[in-house]
Image (cartoon, rainbow, N blue to C red):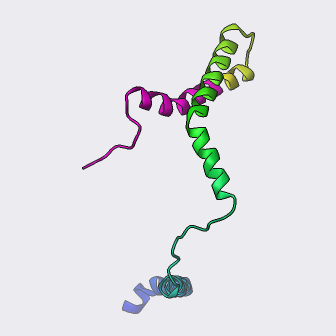
Amino acid sequence: MFVHAFAPLLVKARARAPELGRFAAVSVQIGLIFGLSGAAHAAGSGMPWEEPLQQVLESVQGPVAKIVAVIIIITTGLTLAFGETAGGFRRLIQIVFGLSIAFAASSFFLSFFSFGGGALVA
């Protein structure tokens, strides 16, 4: 009588046994992969295109970014003010206007408040 009461549970447990065995095997394999693999030490690769890209990055973060941002803000502002735009094009102009203000805010307002670095938490 005791065995018959738990028979459905035993059937379910036997049905799950292959799933648990597969899960255990995959877990062991993943553990071995991470445990036995060598550490990948990050180092500078010295690729030939890194230097020109770094120069472009420094140029875009400097005065060029401020000039381009001002031009985009003025152009999109005038387009919104005097243009006969409607629908999707107006929405596109608004998005470009908002993005230009958002990206320019870091270079304008941080230099405006004489603050050009990250926050230092002590």
Q: Nearer the viewer, residue 47 or 102?
A: 47
Residue shown at 57% from the left, 32% from the top:
63
**Residue furthest out toward the left:** 122
Residue 107 colored in magenta in the image: yes
Q: Is residue 24 left or right of residue 98?
A: left
Judge from the rendering whether residue 31 lies leftward or rightward of residue 75; answer left or right: left
Q: Quadrant of residue 89?
A: top right
Magenta-highlighted residues: 96-122
Residue 75 falls in image quadrant: top right
Is residue 69 among the parts visible in the rendering?
yes
Q: Return the x and y of residue 20 as percentages of the image width and height.
A: 51, 84
**In this rendering, does residue 95 appear at all?**
no
Residue 30 placement, left or right of 75: left
Which quarter of the figure is the N terminus placed in?
bottom left
- In the image, 84 versus 103, the foreground residue is 103
Which is nearer the eye, 59 or 106?
59
Q: Is 40 located above or below residue 112 in the figure?
A: below
Number of numbered callouts drawn = 0
Against 117, residue 75 (above or below) is above
Q: Is 83 one of the magenta-colored residues?
A: no
Q: Position of residue 74 (x, y in %)?
A: 63, 17
Residue at the image position 55 percent from the left and 26 percent from the top: 101
Relative to residue 66, is residue 52 depicted above or below? below
Q: Is 80 drawn above or below residue 100 in the view shown?
A: above
| Of 69 and 58, the residue lying toward us | 58
Percent from the top left, x then y, of residue 9? 45, 82
